[in-house]
């Protein structure tokens, strides 16, 4: 389908002048984020000029990448948009759009993170698609950029097709059925042609998959240099995204969802498939296998920096470094963040005054907290859910105890803390910081984990709250997203910046395990899970459940192993932006986001006051409405052929 946008949203594209205006607007509104992406045009007199030579055309290609949503805590729904992270209202409520979604404040009159129209700190994904269409139209014409060799031309076409697929997929996960935007309409298009309709789920999926198949044939297996081509996509990234698209399409939200049985287009066409199609899981298995075959050089990241640390700390550093080590062996597609954006990410999630030598008055702009709901999802040290572990005191997890033997490198010996902070798996300690925990950093004396920094987080203490701003409202910070080289100075901090792991190997392995289980290849699925678990020091699934779980037969059924795989994804990919989409496609967001948001009393000055479970918010998720974003009512008024998603008015 061809798509043309009315002037309030998708401006009609003229061959020359109007296409220039759009390109120039995009160029001047984006921030460069790598050596490659830092080549957007300074000025463009016409679209012809943009494609008259290789240098200018490559600059235009860079603008396509810059249409992607920023990996930002403030503007991206991947963070603070679900139930795992929380914040406070004092100094940033008015512009923290993702959190307003989690608070249940989004309406069809006021859409937050509006990727359809490009409002609330995000570029319209349709705008990105439109720019891809311009680029493809021009670069496919061999008369344009005549000095461009065939290999480079094909590669650029592959990149544009990938990004076009990515923008469609981003919209698909948010809105479900969307208008497929294969071509930009000419200026002569009639008013009726402008009023596009949404395409059904299965048609959208096939279109995205087709784009990725085409892109994968033109993309290189690897980039030549992370210094000059950082953030550019490869064949593996295209096939990995295809696998994710097909797993998403096979999942309960999109595959025979009875909640949307009556959801139809203006012409009566059903928007969602009426019945479940189990063959989609077979397609997903094959797509995952093809993706794995396309990244032979990728491997699960393992910490190998010079340091004197225990095996336990190494396992925890594996969890931390896989995100914060730039373009490491596991990253299949690392989206290059601006230096400032990467630094702000680390500043806003990390514990204040990490170094005991820093003055008490110094603080970070720290405001992101981990909820009890997410804290509970991490396994016990035995590698099973804490509510299932026969040796873990789940009923009394909120009670306090003194840290005893066996907790070395995790918590301060003799310190009074909650039972829920003890005897947990290594990813718990690699992902979270809490009162009484120990944090190993590069700046620790002799880079030795015996000298890890202790955390004292009660009110008025070195790491604790001193007011109502720059605090953790739950008592848990995110450790995982801060580089181990983060250091405090008297009144500021320094830290390396890193690439955002948009696609990494563990994600692909877990998608593969999920698909394998759905086609009843459980042993193969468990093998994939065990690869992930071994990296963090856990025993295999079968051994762990047989020895430690109240449900030892759980891995033997499709339903049981499905729950294990889902929790493994929640833990392994925690705080990386997957939970929002995963819990929705599993149709579990209605469960998780209808629970109370809880934390410790961070204004308590003693252990008795502090370790008091405190209600922060009664979160509400309306089923099925909140599984899909609303299309704004303004857009519906402009285009009478668009139908609203169920439940939104």
Image (tube, helix red, strand yellow):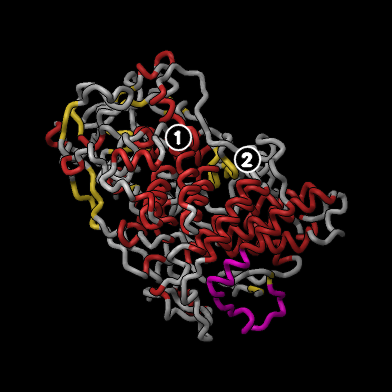
Q: Nearer the viewer, residue 31 or 428?
A: 428
Residue at 65% across, 58% down? 212
Residue drawn at point x = 40 percent, y = 74 percent: 258
Q: Position of residue 613 (x, y in %)?
A: 18, 44
In this rendering, would 329 be left or right of 621? right
Residue under pointer 1: 534
638 is higher (above) or lower (below) than 229 = below
Residue 101 counted in the magenta span: no
Quadrant of the rendered image containing residue 580: bottom left
Q: Position of residue 401 (x, y in %)?
A: 16, 30
The answer to whether the residue labelled 1 contacts the one labelled 2, judged by CB atoms less than 8 Å apart, is no
10 over 195 or under it: above or below: above
Residue 640 appears in view: no
Q: Nearer the viewer, mark 1 or mark 2?
A: 1
The residue segment tinted magenta is 185-208
Graded by Cα atoms within 10 Å as few (under 14), some (14 to 19) or many (20 or more), the crowding at tag 2 reads many
Image height of 337 relative to 442, above or below: below
Q: Residue furthest left?
A: 608
Q: Position of residue 184 (x, y in %)?
A: 68, 70
Q: Nearer the viewer, residue 449 or 382?
A: 382
What mark, if any, has residue 356 been given in the picture? none
The answer to whether residue 200 is magenta is yes
């Amino acid at each position: 389908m061809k798509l043309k946008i009315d002037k309030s949203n998708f401006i009609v594209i003229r061959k020359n002048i109007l296409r220039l205006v759009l390109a120039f607007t995009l160029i001047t509104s984006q921030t460069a984020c790598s050596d490659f992406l830092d080549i957007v045009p300074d000025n463009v007199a016409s679209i012809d000029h943009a494609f008259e030579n290789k240098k200018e055309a490559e600059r235009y290609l860079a603008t396509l990448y810059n249409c992607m949503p920023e990996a930002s805590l403030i503007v991206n729904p991947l963070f603070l948009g679900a139930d795992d992270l929380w914040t406070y209202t004092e100094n940033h409520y008015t512009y923290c759009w993702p959190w307003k979604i989690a608070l249940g404040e989004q309406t069809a009159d006021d859409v937050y993170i509006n990727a359809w129209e490009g409002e609330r700190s995000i570029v319209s994904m349709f705008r990105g698609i439109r720019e891809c269409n311009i680029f493809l139209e021009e670069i496919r014409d061999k008369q344009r950029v005549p000095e461009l060799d065939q290999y480079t031309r094909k590669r650029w076409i592959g990149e544009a097709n990938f990004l076009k697929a990515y923008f469609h997929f981003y919209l698909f996960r948010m809105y479900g059925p969307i208008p497929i935007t294969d071509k930009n309409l000419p200026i002569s298009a009639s008013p009726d042609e402008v009023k596009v309709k949404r395409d059904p789920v299965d048609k959208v999926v096939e279109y995205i998959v087709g784009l990725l198949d085409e892109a994968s044939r033109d993309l290189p297996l690897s980039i030549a240099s992370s210094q000059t081509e950082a953030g550019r996509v490869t064949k593996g990234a295209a096939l990995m995204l295809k696998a994710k698209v097909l797993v998403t399409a096979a999942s309960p939200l999109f595959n025979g969802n009875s909640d949307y049985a009556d959801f139809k287009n203006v012409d009566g066409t059903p928007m969602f498939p009426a019945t479940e199609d189990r063959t989609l899981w077979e397609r997903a298995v094959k797509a995952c296998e093809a993706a794995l075959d396309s990244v032979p050089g990728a491997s699960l990241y393992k910490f190998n920096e010079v340091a004197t640390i225990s095996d336990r700390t190494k396992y925890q550093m594996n969890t931390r470094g896989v995100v914060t080590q730039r373009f490491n062996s596991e990253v299949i597609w690392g989206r290059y963040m601006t230096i400032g954006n990467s630094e702000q990410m680390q500043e806003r999630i990390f514990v204040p005054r990490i170094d005991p030598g820093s003055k008490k008055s110094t603080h970070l702009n720290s405001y992101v907290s981990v909820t009890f709901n997410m804290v509970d999802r991490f396994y016990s040290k035995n590698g099973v859910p804490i509510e299932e572990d026969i040796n873990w005191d789940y009923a009394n997890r909120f009670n306090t105890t003194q840290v005893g033997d066996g907790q070395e490198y995790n918590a301060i010996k003799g310190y009074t803390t909650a039972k829920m902070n003890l005897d947990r798996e290594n990813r718990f300690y690699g992902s979270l910081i809490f009162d009484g925990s120990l944090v190993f950093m590069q700046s620790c004396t002799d880079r030795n984990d015996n000298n890890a920094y202790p955390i004292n987080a009660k009110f008025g203490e070195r790491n604790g709250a001193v007011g109502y701003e720059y605090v953790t409202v739950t008592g848990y910070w995110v450790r995982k997203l801060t580089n181990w080289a983060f250091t405090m100075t008297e009144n500021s901090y320094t830290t390396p910046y890193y690439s955002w792991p948009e696609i990494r190997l563990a994600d692909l392995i877990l998608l593969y395990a999920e698909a394998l289980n759905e086609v009843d290849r459980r042993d193969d699925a468990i093998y994939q899970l065990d690869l992930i678990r071994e990296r963090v020091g856990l025993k295999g699934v079968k051994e762990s459940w047989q020895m430690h779980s109240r449900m030892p037969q759980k891995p033997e059924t499709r339903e049981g192993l499905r729950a294990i795989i889902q929790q493994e994804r929640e833990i392994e990919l925690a705080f990386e932006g997957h939970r929002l989409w995963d819990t929705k496609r599993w149709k579990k967001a209605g469960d998780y986001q209808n629970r109370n948001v809880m934390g410790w009393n961070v204004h308590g000055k003693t252990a008795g006051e502090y370790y008091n479970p405190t209600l922060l918010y009664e979160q509400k998720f309306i089923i099925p409405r909140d599984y899909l974003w609303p299309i704004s009512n303004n857009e519906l008024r402009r285009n009478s052929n668009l139908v609203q998603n169920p439940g939104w008015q």
